Image (cartoon, rainbow, N blue to C red):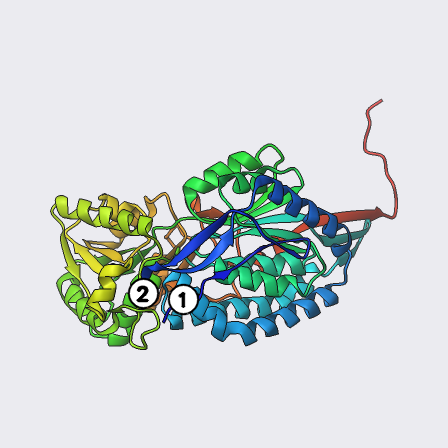
Amino acid sequence: MATEPITVHAIINGQPISTDKKQPRENPANPEEIVGYAPVNSREDTVQAIEAAYQAFGSWKTSAVEERIERMRRAIEKLRAAIPDLARLLSREHGKPLYDAEGEFAISLMWMEFACDHVKEVVQEEVRQHEKGKTIISHDPIGVVSAITPWNYPISLSTIKIAPAILTGNTMVLKPSPFAPLAVSKVAEIISAEFPPGVLNLVHGEADVGVELTSHPKVAKIAFTGGTKTAKHIIKAASETIKKMTLELGGNDAAIILPGFDVNDERAMRRLVISNFLTAGQICMIAKRVYVHRSLYDEFVKKYREAADKWIRVGDPFHPQVTIGPVNNLGQVKYVQSLIDDAQQRGAEVIKLGKVVDPELFERGYFMQPTIVLGCDYHDPIVVEEQFGPTLPILPFDDEEQVIALHNESIYGLTSSVWGKEEDAIRVARRIEAGTTMINTAAVQGLDVRFPFGGVKQSGVGREYGLEGIRSYTETHVINIPTELELPYIPE
C-alpha cells in the first residue's frame, strides 16, 4: 500500500537544512510511486558541512572515549527501536525484501556494538620502557572524514564508517547515494542527535558535492564504498593534499566447486544459491561467477537449478514468500540485461530460475527474473565484468591450476569461496588472490564483523570491520623519551 512521500534533510552543524531543489526517489517495485524526496545540496552547502566538522573536531578529538561510547550506545538503542519503520522505508526505496532490509539493520547494529566494545582496546596508549629510555605510542584521531556510500547496502555501508570514525574522535560528513537516500538519512539523523553539533553531518547531491568532499583541504580522510572507476577519480582528487583513504571497491567474486563437493547436499546448494542472488545479486561480495570441476558439472547444474527453483520467489518486497525483489534502478537493469544479451549473441544458454509471484507487478517494476548462463567463454564480458545483478555464469574447469589461474587473472580480488572437502578447500584458498576467502559458504552468510574486510588489487585499499577497521580511523603517534642523549657518530 502506497503512503505519502517523506522528505529528508541535510544535517549541517546539528541543524536540518532544506533546499529548493529536491531529488525524488521512486519505489523500484512500482516506479510510479514516489517514496520520498532528498535535498540536492550545493558545493557551498558541502563546504559549510566540512567547516562544521572541522570546527567540531577541535573539541571532539579531546573528548573521553567513555563519553563517545556512551553516546553511541544511546544511538544504537534508538536505532533498534526504530527498525520496524526504518526497515520498511529501506525496503520501499531500495527494493530489497523486508527480511533482507531487517537483516541489514541487524548487521549494522552488530558492528556498531562491536566498535563500542573494542574501541578502547584500539586507542589504548602504549608505554614501553626499554634500554634507551621510554616510548609512548598513541593512536590519535585523524580529523574530518568524508564518507561516500552506495545504494546497495546503504545502512551497513554507512554505519561501517560512522561508528569507528566517531568513536575514535573524528568528525564526519556523510554523502549517501541518490538511489537509496531516505532510510540512511533517518539513521544519520538519529545518530547525529546524540553527538555535539558538527560531529556527524549529512549532505546529498551530485558530482560537485563529491568533488568537494574528496578534494577539500580540511578533509583528512576519505572512506568510500563504490565502483572502481569512481575510486580512480577520488584518488586523483585527493592527491593534491595526500589524504588518508579506505576504499572498498568492485568485485567479481568467484565460487570454486571442487571434486569433493557433494552436489546432493541440499543445504549447501541453498547456501550457494543465496550467495549468488541475495539482494537480487546487488552485493559487492556476492559470488558472481561459479567454476565447477568438469566431473561434477552436469549434475551440479541440475541440482543447482532444483535448489534455485525452491528458493527464488521474485515479487513485492513485502510479500511474505518473496525472497528477491526488484533491481534498484532502471540503469542497472539495462546494464545487466546488456550482459545477458551479449552472452546469448555469443552462443550461451540462458536459463530462468524460480518463480515470479505477481506477473503484473513484475512488468511494472524494475524486476529481473534470476538466470544462470551456461556455455560462456572464460573471457566473455558476463564472466569478467561485475554484473551486480541477478544473473550468474557457471563454467567448468579441469584442474586446480587452471581454476586458480582463472580466478587470479581478474583485476578484482574482494572475496571468494571454495566449496568441497575442508582440507582441499583450504589448500586452494591459500593460493587465491582475495581479501577474504570463505569455505563452503559465501557472501553475507560468511561475513563476520569481528574480522577485517576489504579487497586486493583493484577491489580496494585498506580494511573495514574488525579491530583493523577501527584502527584505520587513527594515526599512530610515537613520543620518544631517551634517558641518555648521545650524539650520532660524526667524523672529525
Position of 119 with respect to 296 (left or right) is: right
Q: Which mark is residue 235?
A: none
Q: Quadrant of residue 194?
A: bottom right
The x and y percentages for residue 43 are: 58, 40
Q: Quadrant of residue 260?
A: bottom left
Q: Quadrant of residue 253?
A: bottom left
The x and y percentages for residue 402 are: 25, 49
Question: Can the viewer see residue 424 in this picture?
Answer: no
Which is nearer the eye, 165 or 209?
A: 209
Which is nearer the eye, 479 or 118?
A: 118
Which is nearer the eye, 490 or 452?
A: 452
Q: Residue furthest right?
A: 484
Q: Quadrant of the N terminus?
A: bottom left
**Marks 1/2: CA distance?**
9 Å
Q: Quick check: marks 1 and 2 in contact, CB under 8 Å?
A: yes
Residue located 60% across and 44% down the image: 46
Above or below — where is 486 with respect to 52? Answer: above
The x and y percentages for residue 105 are: 49, 69
Which is nearer the eye, 343 or 196?
A: 196
Q: Identify which amino acid the numbered label 1 is placed on.
A: Ser
Above or below — where is 294 with respect to 269? Answer: above
Q: Quadrant of the C terminus?
A: top right
Q: Residues within 10 Å of mark 2 (few under 14, many from 20)?
A: many
Write down the residue under mark 1: 91
Question: Can the viewer see residue 393 in this picture?
Answer: yes
Q: Residues within 10 Å of mark 1 (few under 14, many from 20)?
A: many
Write down the residue under mark 2: 325
Judged from the image, the secondary structure of the residue bearing numbered disc 1 is helix
Pick whichever of labels 1 and 2 is earlier in the sequence: 1
Q: Identify which amino acid the numbered label 2 is placed on.
A: Gly
Judged from the image, the secondary structure of the residue bearing numbered disc 2 is loop
